[in-house]
């Protein structure tokens, strides 16, 4: 009696890797590399046992995962305040986030194509609006920006609780902070998000500064970006 085995086909190694991460329901920024690597290798072995040709990209990804796994297993060096040890998974995570973004964008464009393929539209900016509504890989999601803001607010509390005397501004509005940010960016190419929040006189002004950033993103006046997971967030004018 023959046994039929249905094996899901993946177009590339990142699609397979992303599928395993979603199936395991783990955080893409904190991948259990040993577990995912073992699952990935097991899948490749199954493909080989079924005489399915493996593309070179799948094998390269397998080698990459094994290398990261070996680095994660190595004993960690003693902590040094001057040297920040990098996470071996960082580059892989960055590429996975990029893959996830383009995958989601392709689904949106496909949906829009199904809706508009039988319609005529004079507005040539429609495609740009759809694409710009998504954060590209070098831009930040609002969730990441919020996490960074919450971290900075905790850091501010440590300074604010030292008992030093401060002179507080009587009133400040979101529009005031919007004007301030645009004025800074009119003469400077970039503005660090950390500096914007930490330079505020008090907690209320810091909250208004954060709301101003969100409003400027909404108005498409600025965009925010981060080179890697641990770098400072940069604000640029469009």
Image (tube, rainbow, N blue to C red):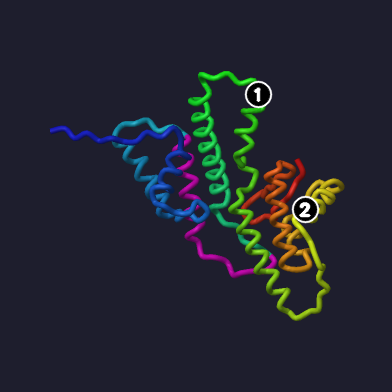
Q: Quadrant of residue 9?
A: top left
Residue 52 circle label:
none
**Residue nearest the viewer, comparing 130 with 16:** 130
Residue 66 drawn in magenta: yes
Specify whether 34 is left or right of 116.
Answer: left
* Label 2 crowd bin: few (<14), some (14–19), many (20+), radius 10 Å: some
Most extreme residue toward the bottom, as rendered?
A: 163
Task: Identify whether 82 is placed above or below 18.
Answer: below
Residue 175 circle label:
2
Which residues lie in the magenta part? Answer: 57-82
In the rendering, at what x and y percent does residue 40 appear?
40, 45
Task: Tell me the chief SS of the magenta region.
Answer: helix
* Label 1 crowd bin: few (<14), some (14–19), many (20+), radius 10 Å: few
In the rendering, at what x and y percent does residue 127 appear?
62, 28
- CA separation, marks 1 and 2? 31 Å
Task: Identify whether 86 is placed above or below 217.
Answer: below
Residue of label 1: 123
């Amino acid at each position: 009696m023959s046994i039929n085995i249905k094996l899901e086909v993946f177009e590339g190694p990142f699609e397979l890797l992303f599928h395993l991460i979603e199936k395991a329901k783990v955080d893409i920024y904190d991948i259990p590399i040993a577990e995912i690597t073992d699952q990935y290798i097991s899948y490749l072995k199954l493909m080989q046992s079924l005489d399915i040709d493996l593309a070179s990209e799948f094998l390269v990804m397998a080698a990459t995962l094994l290398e990261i796994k070996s680095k994660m297993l190595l004993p960690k060096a003693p902590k040094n305040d001057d040297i920040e040890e990098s996470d071996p998974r960082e580059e892989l995570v960055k590429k996975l986030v990029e893959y996830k973004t383009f995958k989601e964008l392709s689904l949106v464009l496909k949906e829009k194509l199904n809706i508009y393929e039988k319609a005529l539209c004079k507005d040539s900016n429609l495609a740009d609006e759809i694409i710009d509504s998504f954060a590209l890989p070098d831009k930040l999601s609002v969730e990441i920006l919020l996490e960074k803001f919450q971290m900075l607010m905790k850091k501010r509390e440590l300074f604010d609780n030292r008992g030093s005397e401060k002179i507080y501004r009587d009133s400040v509005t979101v529009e005031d902070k919007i004007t301030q940010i645009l004025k800074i960016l009119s003469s400077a190419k970039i503005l660090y998000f950390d500096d914007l929040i930490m330079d505020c006189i008090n907690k209320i002004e810091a909250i208004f500064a954060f709301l101003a950033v969100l409003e400027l993103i909404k108005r498409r006046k600025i965009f925010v970006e981060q080179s890697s997971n641990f770098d400072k967030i940069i604000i640029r004018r469009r």
